[in-house]
Image (spheres, rainbow, N blue to C red):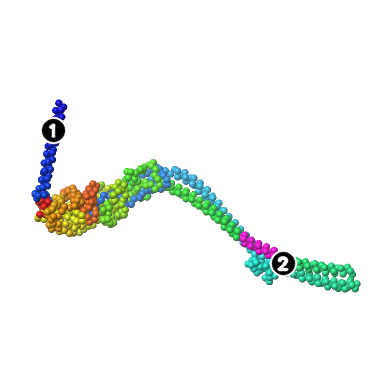
Amino acid sequence: MNGSMSTNKGSHWFSLKKALIAGTIVVVCLFLWGVYSNQSGTVADVTVATAPVTRGDLIVDVLEASSIDAAESQIIRSKVEGKATLIFIIPEGSTITHEDVENKKVLVQMDSADLRDRRTQQTITVQSGRAALTEASESFLIQVKTNESALKAGELKVKFGLMDLEKYLGQNLATAFLDHPEIAFSELIESASLGGEALQKRREMSNTKLLEEIQETLAKEKLEWTTKLHDRGFVSLNDFKVDQLAVEKSKVALEKADTAINLFKDYEFQKEAEKLRSDYQESVRDLDRIKAKNRSELAKAEAKLASASATYQNQVDQLEKINQQIENCTIIATQPGLVVYAGSDNPMRDRRIEEGAEVFERQEIIKIPNTTSMLAKARIHETVIARIKEGQKAFITAESLPDKTYQGVVKKVGILPDSQDRWRNPDLKVYQTDLSIQGDTSELKPGMTAQARIIISELRGVLQVPVQAVETRGKESYCFLMTPKGPERRQIVTGEYNDKFIEIKEGLKEGDKVALSMSSFDSPMKPGDQHLKDGKAEGDESSPPEEEQKEEGEGRHEREGAPPPGEGSPGMEAAPSREGMPPGGSDQAPSERRRRRGNGQDRQGPPQAESPGEKPPVEPAAPVDQGGKKPVRVGQAGQ
């Protein structure tokens, strides 16, 4: 029985397989027949939506997601050295008013117990330092007076030494003796400039010798008379001997006076003059030593005073610093605004700001944005940033306030790429751009998500067609011009563009009708097909190269993915961001459109509002000629 069931199952599977193969063959045959019919000139009814070439104003803009932030924010950081513990912090989301600022409302309180203990110890240290400074100051004053006394004594000694020398030799000879120490003493004693005590003594000795010479002469004369009288018997022998003794005495006295003069000249004068000169010179050297010692002692006293002063000042500074640290433990409100904890917008933050948490010096604790002046922060892709300039108009719409549009101005364009998300996508390069928001911004809150539309330029009275009607291959742009004979492939020159319309500089005129859906005409050309270019037939044109077919297919895929215009859908996808490059002409256009479509940035037309609160008007969609629909022979568009 089991064998019979297996046989039935096998037969059933074989029959099903045969049916699938037959169905596949039929589908393939139908497909090949359709392809052959199209290439052989069979008629395929194709409905083509068209739009006229119009002349009007063209607003070129860039639409980017942005975030609302305050133009000015007060960032409160911890100023306490090291780390501190939060013992109180105002609840996040609290509103600081002007009254709170006047009343010096406490926003943050950190633990300061350790700092207060340090202040007590430092106060004692400061008092000790003040005593040391007073002692050093008094010592310095004492040293100054001591130096003055020593200097005065040394100067007097020099003065008195010079006076003693001049007193002994005379002023003139003393000066010469000091200036010319090589002068011989024999010249000094006989010098006519000799004065003072030396001259006085030399005179006394000379006078004494002169008197002794006179005494000797008188004694000799008396002895001669005594001798004559003695010989005659008139004088006794005793008187004769007395006169002889007087002569001998006068000789001795004369010799003594002569010897005294020689001793004075040869020894006493030289000794006294040399001694007085040496004393004077030594006093001069003593004065130099006193001055040097005074400088040394004064320098020591000054260094001690400076050290004591610096130590005391450092101790005072430390005390003031501790007092300042204690004050820094209490942070009060200084401006009104909204309280936002640091890192609230960063889910990856390591530490939470809350009571009991530890914060470090310079760590951000609270951010208080000034909501009276707001701005939108947009991140502009590198392909567009060259077209963004300061002063350009912008329109900002917050997602939470979709019915209100704010007017703004480009305030700042980033110079370097923003590296915020570079670790996730190294190839993504966007530039931070700030847009100042004008008017009443009281309803806006920091962190709101918004759309920012920046007006690049406003062209007046230019020819334009919908972006779906233009295709770019390489550096050339084309569109299909609808004629009574059918669509013609027309080469055109394009200009500026936005997400809906593109400027036509050459190749079309006002009133012409162009096809919006080009996929029906974009099949590769075969030899012998007519391919119109600039309105002239051109045959035997070979198929485009593989890269061009790939690029054409990618552009067609993007166009076919967009719904028909005029149905209230996003319709015309975002134009590429590269300046001067129409849709389909760069790799940026499809990816940029997909990126914006994924971010919900479908455009609703360029804004025209001039004041906040007014919605910018929507630019009308491209007019579509529904009555111009007609059967078109696929593959023979030029006939």
Q: Residue at x 17, y 59 (%)?
A: 506
Report the magenta stretch's main SS. Answer: helix
Q: Residue at x 70, y 67 (%)?
A: 198
Q: Residue at x 29, y 51 (%)?
A: 429
Q: For the view shown, which residue lies furthest in the top direction?
A: 1
Q: Nearer the viewer, mark 2 or mark 1?
A: 1
Q: Quadrant of the C terminus?
A: bottom left
Answer with mark 2 or mark 1, whichever residue precedes in sequence. 1
| Residue 467, percent from left and from top | 18, 53
131 left or right of 579? right
Residue 12, numbered circle:
1
Q: Is residue 407 magenta?
A: no
Q: For the view shown, which residue lies furthest in the left direction?
A: 42
Q: Quadrant of the N terminus?
A: top left
Q: How far is mark 2 from mark 1, CA to CA?
A: 166 Å
| Residue 540, percent from left and from top | 13, 55
Badge 1 element:
helix
The answer to whether any part of residue 72 appears in the image is yes
Instruction: Find the magenta span and give its range.
Output: 269-287
Q: Nearer the viewer, residue 23 or 314?
A: 23
The answer to whether any part of residue 518 appears in the image is no
Q: Is residue 603 above or below residue 4?
A: below
Q: Nearer the viewer, residue 491 or 48?
A: 491
Residue on which the image places disc 2: 265
Residue type at the position of mark 2: Lys
